Image (cartoon, helix red, strand yellow):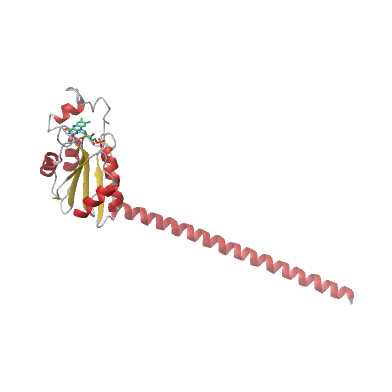
Amino acid sequence: MKKIIALTTALVLIIMFAGCNANNSASQTDAETKAAASTSASKASEKTTSKSKDTDNSGKTLVAYFSATGTTEKTAKLIAVCENADIYEITAAKPYTSEDLDYNNSDSRTTKEQNDDTVRPEIGSKKLNLDGYDTIYIGFPIWWGEEPRIMDTFVESYDFNGKAVIPFCTSGSSPIDTAEKNLKSNANGGDWKDGRRFSAETDKDEIQKWLKTL
Ligand SMILES: Cc1cc2nc3c(=O)[nH]c(=O)nc-3n(C[C@H](O)[C@H](O)[C@H](O)COP(=O)(O)O)c2cc1C
């Protein structure tokens, strides 16, 4: 009788142990499936997000700027933060060296470029897709009272029709007026708003006050 009880208990224990293992592997498989599913879902959603970043810019604002020594870049970044805008740096295919920027040298690259309003320095940064952007801020430093010629390359490279274009510049003291007039007349369309000149000391408060007036 004792032997029968012992055998029955052993049998019951073996059956319970086997069932437990089966449950464990079942739940492991479930967990693995769920993890795999969630990874592919998040990969799919990443793809959609980056796709929509590339192609769907409806109603969005862009700040595009050129800056040789960082002053305009600082202002551009403040505008982009305040406007929750995308930002794009216009760079020269052949970067400007400090010798190039020497305005005391009548033979420097910038002096020569600014003396010839037909010069169009090549842009080095990746081509933009302006589809869906309805407001574009365009920033640059003043060189010899005007826009750097690379800004003319920029405005001639894109179609601004149906978009509000808001120019801004930084300078030692010169106003934006001539640059603004030149860019507007060279650009492919766009609803050009009054531009604004900033100094190197411009802070977020000043930017916010200006943005409220637009
Ligand atoms: C080649 C060159 C020409 C410049 N010409 C003028 C000028 O005519 N009037 C002015 O107020 N500032 C002039 N500046 C000063 C710049 O406009 C000013 O430092 C600007 O904020 C620089 O911006 P960035 O750092 O974004 O390049 C000139 C600077 C350079 C390099």
Which quadrant of the view contains residue 120?
top left
Judged left or right of residue 25, residue 212 is: left
- Ligand 1 quadrant? top left
Quarter of the image for the C terminus: give it: bottom left
Whether residue 77 is visible: yes
Residue found farthest to the bottom: 1
Whether residue 214 is visible: no
| Residue 6 locus on image (x, y percent) | 85, 72
Judged left or right of residue 100, residue 53 is: right
Q: Which of these two is toward me, 146 or 91?
A: 146
Quarter of the image for the N terminus: give it: bottom right
| Residue 122 locus on image (x, y percent) | 22, 34
Residue at 22% over, 54% down: 212
All told, the count of numbered labels is 0
- Position above or below: 41 against 188: below
Judged left or right of residue 27, residue 122 is: left
| Residue 100 locus on image (x, y percent) | 24, 26
Which quadrant of the view contains residue 168?
top left
Judged left or right of residue 158, residue 81 is: right
| Residue 90 locus on image (x, y percent) | 25, 40
Which quadrant of the view contains residue 71?
top left
Residue at 66% over, 66% down: 22
- Position above or below: 111 against 213: above
Residue at 51% over, 58% down: 36
